[in-house]
């Protein structure tokens, strides 16, 4: 099955330079064995959770700005799942909730419920607000965070399995581009104070959605070099899901010394040891070279 998936990727990737780039990266990496099954499910679930948060915020912000006119009173926002219901919360500078936008599972803005009644945070919302604010303070005072032209940093608080984190993703105002990288993970101690800040990618990766010569891109890839983030990251998965409807990518690959991660649009994630992927690609190209060519007969 895995072998067939790889063949399909190569057959549908019309850009031979891209194929050669993938292979060049792979064959310059030394092999380091590690079992990818231990964390592939967790990475995928974390990425999906990030996607739900960001999709809620994307749609929630548009709706709230349309209905709430006192812009100077807005202090910020965050999103979370409330018993399975995606909610985007907007708060004032005096730290009161001034808007709650609730969505159905399909995130259709037409079906969203809008509540502009001012109220206090719930206990769960207070937890989200607290880590968001502590992350924001760190972001303003730590030189690890970079902001590039035509971009801004999105703060995404996430509480799963009683573990509190804040992801920082890069969003762009430039058209026809998808941004990977320039993303960060902030973790917290039991008192909700920042415990650690780390980069998830070595830099920012800008990929075009469409190409003037070939039209929509069919697939994409990038490499990972940070030791602790060798597989596809939750932020990568979140970005791929957010931009899925804008691209025609039929697969996406990340490669590193340890792992090759393959994601496809039905949100299936496969992580392989780099050594295994190398072996399969070698077999595929060997079979293609050894396959006899059928002579053409002209009448």
Image: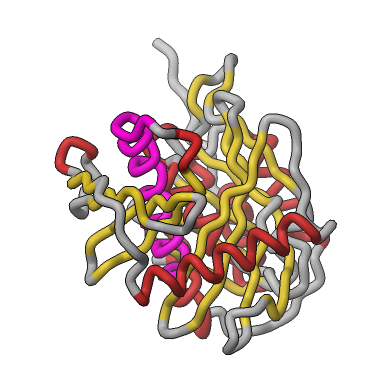
Question: Is residue 202 part of the magenta span, yes or no?
Answer: no
Residue 68, given in percent of the width and then of the height, sits at 33, 35
Q: Can residue 10 be seen at all in this image of the molecule?
A: yes
Residue sitting at 25 percent across and 50 percent down?
Answer: 117
Question: Is residue 58 part of the magenta span, yes or no?
Answer: yes
Q: Is residue 176 above or below residue 222?
A: above
Q: In the rendered view of the protein, which quadrant contains the N terminus?
A: bottom left
Residue sitting at 23 percent across and 71 percent down?
Answer: 83
Residue sitting at 53 percent across and 38 percent down?
Answer: 13
Nearer the observer, 154 or 10: 154
Residue sitting at 33 percent across and 71 percent down?
Answer: 122
Question: Which quarter of the figure has residue 35?
Answer: bottom right
Nearer the observer, 42 or 54: 54
Q: Can residue 233 be seen at all in this image of the molecule?
A: no
Write down the region rendered in magenta.
44-69
Q: Is residue 166 above or below residue 238?
A: below
| Left or right relative to 5: residue 273 | right
Residue 140, given in percent of the width and then of the height, sits at 74, 55
């Amino acid at each position: 099955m895995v072998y067939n998936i790889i063949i399909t990727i190569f057959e549908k990737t019309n850009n031979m330079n891209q194929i050669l780039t993938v292979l060049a990266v792979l064959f310059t990496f030394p092999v380091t064995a590690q079992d990818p099954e231990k964390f592939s499910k967790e990475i995928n679930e974390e990425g999906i959770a990030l996607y739900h948060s960001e999709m809620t915020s994307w749609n929630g912000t548009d709706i709230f700005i349309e209905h709430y006119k006192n812009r100077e009173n807005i202090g910020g926002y965050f999103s979370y799942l409330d018993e399975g219901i995606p909610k985007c919360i907007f708060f004032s500078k005096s730290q009161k909730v001034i808007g709650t936008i609730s969505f159905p599972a399909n995130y259709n803005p037409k079906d969203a419920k809008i509540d502009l009644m001012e109220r206090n945070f719930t206990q769960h919302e207070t937890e989200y607000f607290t880590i968001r604010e502590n992350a924001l303070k760190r972001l303003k005072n730590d030189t690890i965070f970079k902001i590039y032209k035509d971009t801004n940093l999105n703060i995404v608080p996430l509480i799963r399995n009683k573990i509190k984190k804040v992801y920082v993703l890069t969003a762009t105002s430039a058209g026809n581009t998808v941004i990977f990288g320039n993303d960060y993970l902030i973790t917290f101690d039991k008192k909700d104070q920042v415990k650690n800040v780390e980069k998830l990618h070595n830099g920012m990766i800008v990929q075009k959605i469409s190409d003037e010569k070939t039209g929509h891109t069919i697939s994409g890839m990038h490499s990972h070099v940070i030791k602790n983030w060798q597989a596809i990251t939750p932020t990568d998965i979140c970005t791929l899901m957010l931009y899925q409807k804008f691209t025609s990518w039929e697969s996406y690959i990340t490669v590193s010394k340890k792992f090759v991660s393959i994601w496809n649009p039905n949100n299936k994630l496969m992580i392989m040891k780099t050594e295994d992927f190398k072996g399969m690609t070698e077999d595929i190209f060997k079979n293609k070279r050894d396959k006899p060519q059928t002579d053409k007969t002209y009448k």
